[in-house]
Image (cartoon, grey):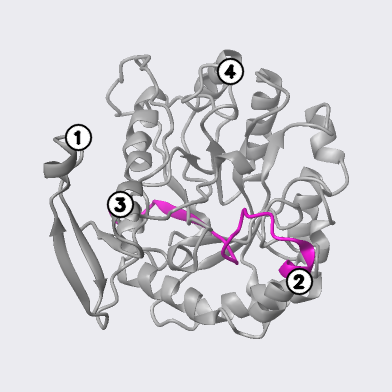
């Protein structure tokens, strides 16, 4: 996934209070693999999409709302896969604040045939361009168990929220250079750390997680096969596949080293199903041929799930820059009524919302921490534009 779409800073506080009170804190009080085959019928002439379909539309509650809107745009095609990302800035956010995950958990629990997919960073400061030598040390520390507790807390919270069957896309695009959880600086330590995380999360009572190993398509910085941690700790072999160079055509994307065909062959060799957690348009622009061929490839190989990345420049619904690809996607996925179904009206064009970043995730309060709080009448000093605040200092 391109780095500019990540949410990298979840700090809290205000500049005004920072000037007034040094150091103060502003108080602002599973679905099974058999899901493949329960698909929908597209428009006449298009392939039957038999895999579980979804889209990435936004991190939080707005993403949940947009699932229903996208379904309406597709004439009733059900979006059965909800996809979100845990922020990779701080460990407290990688642990998964219940307030952040709650809306997706409620969406998943509303129907047995739904699937919740959660991209999970392996390290904090995940987009901070941490140098290789520091990444190497962090991977080795993780392999030694230094970060186990963070992933135990995440597993506990997902179970408590009623989504113990979440698909965890752990350390995605590890064969690239973007993320601190990249594999290249030390593949041996990376694999040991992955195994440690999976073992830790599987130790939580009630869990039914599936772990999705999802590299970038192609070789990137390191062949992704060198990062594969083992069949006993991987449930699904995914791939993030955007329409971009060096592949010039879809056939290139299939046949390039470590491309789409390699994913299919590697998964078959290891007895694993495949997935496409991220795919969509990118540097090749509005490309209806790519859109058609990718959907046909998905139908041919029946992944557990596929979720298109839907916002500019990748999207077909929330991005008006790709009208031809949008038409192909809509034609191929629009639901057609079956026997006994009510006849749906033609999809009504709607103005898609622009994707927005979610509200900051506020760490949960420590029940053992004592604080001394006072009210600060900022409105008396600055007028109606600055509301009163409560300022708390450690007791």
> Label 4 to label 2, Cα distance in Å?
40 Å
Q: Secondary structure at mark 3?
A: helix
Compared to 194, does 286 lie above or below? Answer: above
Q: Where does residue 132 sit, x and y in percent of width and height?
A: 78, 63
Disc number lying in front (1 or 4): 1
285, 48: nearer the viewer: 285
**Which of pointers 1 and 4 lies earlier in the amino acid sequence?**
4
Compared to 247, does 7 lie above or below? Answer: below
226, 389: nearer the viewer: 389
The residue wearing badge 2 is: 136
Q: Where does residue 48 sit, x and y in percent of width and height?
A: 56, 32
| Residue 77 shown in magenta | no
**Which of pointers 1 and 3 lies earlier in the amino acid sequence?**
3
Give the left or right position of residue 140, taking residue 188 as reference: left
Compared to 29, does 344 lie above or below? Answer: above
Q: Where does residue 14 sit, x and y in percent of width and height?
A: 33, 49
| Residue 131 shown in magenta | yes
The residue wearing badge 4 is: 322
Disc number lying in front (1 or 2): 1
| Residue 385: mark in rendering | 1
Compared to 147, does 373 lie above or below? Answer: above
The residue wearing badge 3 is: 103
> Label 1 to label 2, Cα distance in Å?
48 Å
Disc number lying in front (4 or 2): 2
**Which of pointers 4 and 2 lies earlier in the amino acid sequence?**
2
> Label 2 to label 3, Cα distance in Å?
36 Å
**Which of pointers 2 and 3 lies earlier in the amino acid sequence?**
3
Q: Where does residue 300 sit, x and y in percent of width and height?
A: 67, 39
Q: Quadrant of residue 183?
A: bottom right
Q: Which residues are magenta?
A: 107-136
Disc number lying in front (1 or 3): 1
């Amino acid at each position: 996934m391109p780095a500019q779409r990540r949410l990298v800073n979840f700090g809290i506080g205000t500049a005004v209070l920072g000037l007034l009170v040094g150091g103060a804190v502003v108080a602002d009080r599973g679905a099974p693999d058999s899901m493949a085959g329960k698909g929908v019928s597209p428009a006449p002439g298009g392939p039957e999409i038999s895999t579980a379909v979804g889209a990435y539309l936004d991190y939080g509650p707005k993403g949940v709302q947009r699932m229903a809107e996208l379904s309406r745009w597709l004439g009733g095609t059900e979006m059965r896969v909800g996809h979100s990302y845990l922020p990779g800035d701080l460990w407290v956010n990688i642990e998964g604040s219940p307030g952040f995950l709650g809306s997706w958990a409620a969406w998943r629990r509303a129907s047995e045939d739904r699937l919740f997919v959660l991209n999970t960073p392996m390290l904090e400061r995940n987009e901070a361009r941490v140098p290789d030598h520091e990444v190497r040390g962090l991977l080795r520390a993780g392999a030694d168990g230094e970060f186990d507790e963070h992933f135990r807390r995440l597993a506990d919270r997902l179970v408590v929220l009623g989504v113990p069957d979440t698909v965890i896309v752990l350390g995605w695009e590890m064969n690239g250079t973007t993320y601190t959880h990249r594999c290249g600086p030390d593949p041996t330590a990376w694999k040991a750390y992955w195994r440690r995380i999976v073992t830790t999360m599987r130790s939580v009572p009630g869990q039914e997680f599936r772990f999705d190993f999802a590299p970038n398509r192609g070789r990137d910085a390191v062949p992704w096969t060198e990062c594969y941690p083992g069949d006993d700790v991987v449930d699904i072999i995914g791939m993030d596949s955007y329409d971009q160079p060096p592949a010039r055509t879809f056939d290139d994307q299939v046949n390039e080293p470590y491309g789409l065909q390699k994913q299919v062959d590697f998964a078959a060799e290891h007895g694993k199903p495949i997935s496409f957690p991220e795919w969509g348009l990118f540097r090749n622009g509005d490309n209806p041929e790519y859109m058609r061929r990718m959907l046909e490839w998905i139908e041919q190989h029946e992944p557990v799930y596929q979720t298109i990345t839907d916002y500019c420049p990748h999207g077909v619904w929330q991005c008006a820059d790709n009208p031809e690809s949008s038409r192909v996607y809509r034609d191929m996925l629009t639901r057609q009524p079956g026997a006994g179904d009510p006849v749906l009206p033609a999809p009504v064009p709607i103005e898609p919302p622009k994707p927005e970043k979610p509200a900051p995730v506020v760490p949960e309060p420590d029940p053992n921490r004592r604080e001394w709080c006072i009210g600060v009448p900022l409105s008396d000093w600055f007028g109606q534009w600055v509301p009163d605040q409560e300022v708390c200092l450690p007791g």
